[in-house]
Amino acid sequence: MLSENLLNELNEQVNFEFYSSYTYLAMSAFAESVDLSGFANFFRVQAQEELFHAMKLYDYIFQKGGVVKLDTVQKPNSEFKDIIDAFEKGYEHEKLVTSKIYKLADIASEEKEHATLSLLNWFIDEQVEEENNFNSLLKRVRRSEGNPAALYMMDDELATRIFTPPTAKA
């Protein structure tokens, strides 16, 4: 059974993951509006990943005898100066997600809630990948500034990204 404190924090994270999905949909809409459909696809897939993360936590809460409490999803920022700005905000958002997962892991560790720690280790590993992915793409998008050919090559590359849910139970 989860403590009330940990349950509340996990519920906050479920809701934040839904917000994260909404955030990436806003970035997708921006990219689509500036005729960068490959970038739009990248962000749409990112939104799908965030929904997967929310549901992973959602399912876990019920597995541990808790109840999920959904809240209003905050309106995301939808104003971006350019695609570089969208990636900068995406990278900052992923760093925020990481800090929230670390906070959850700290609480679970203090409470000796080993099952939750096991779940959160999956999220910690996922965040290393997410931050690295955004940082790498941000560097590439910055290098493409002023070079439309490079930008459109990235756009073509990102158009091929698909969401494949992990199959291993973690």
Image (cartoon, rainbow, N blue to C red):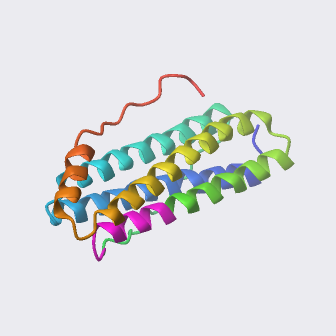
Report x, y in % for residue 106.
78, 52
Main SS category, magenta section: helix
Report x, y in % for residue 81.
29, 77
Q: Does any portion of residue 4 appear in the rendered image?
A: no
Q: Residue at coordinates 16% horizontally, 66% vertically from top-left? A: 34
Q: Residue at coordinates 56% horizontally, 57% vertically from top-left? A: 97
Q: Residue at coordinates 56% horizontally, 60% vertically from top-left? A: 95
What segment carries the magenta color? Answer: 80-92
How many numbered discs sit on the rendered protein?
Answer: 0
- 145 above or below 25? below
Q: 166 or 76: nearer the eye?
A: 166
Quadrant in which the N terminus is drawn = top right
Report x, y in % for residue 96.
57, 62
Q: Is residue 42 left or right of residue 58?
A: left
Q: 40 or 139: nearer the eye?
A: 139
Q: 58 or 108: nearer the eye?
A: 108
Q: Does any portion of residue 120 appear in the rendered image?
A: yes
Residue 140 in the magenta stretch? The answer is no
Q: Given the current orientation, which residue lies at the most extreme left position?
A: 35
Q: Given the current orientation, which residue lies at the most extreme top position?
A: 168
Report x, y in % for residue 119.
66, 36
Q: Residue at coordinates 55% horizontally, 35% vertically from top-left? A: 59
Q: 105 or 37: nearer the eye?
A: 37
Quadrant in which the C terminus is drawn = top right
Residue 90 in the magenta stretch? The answer is yes
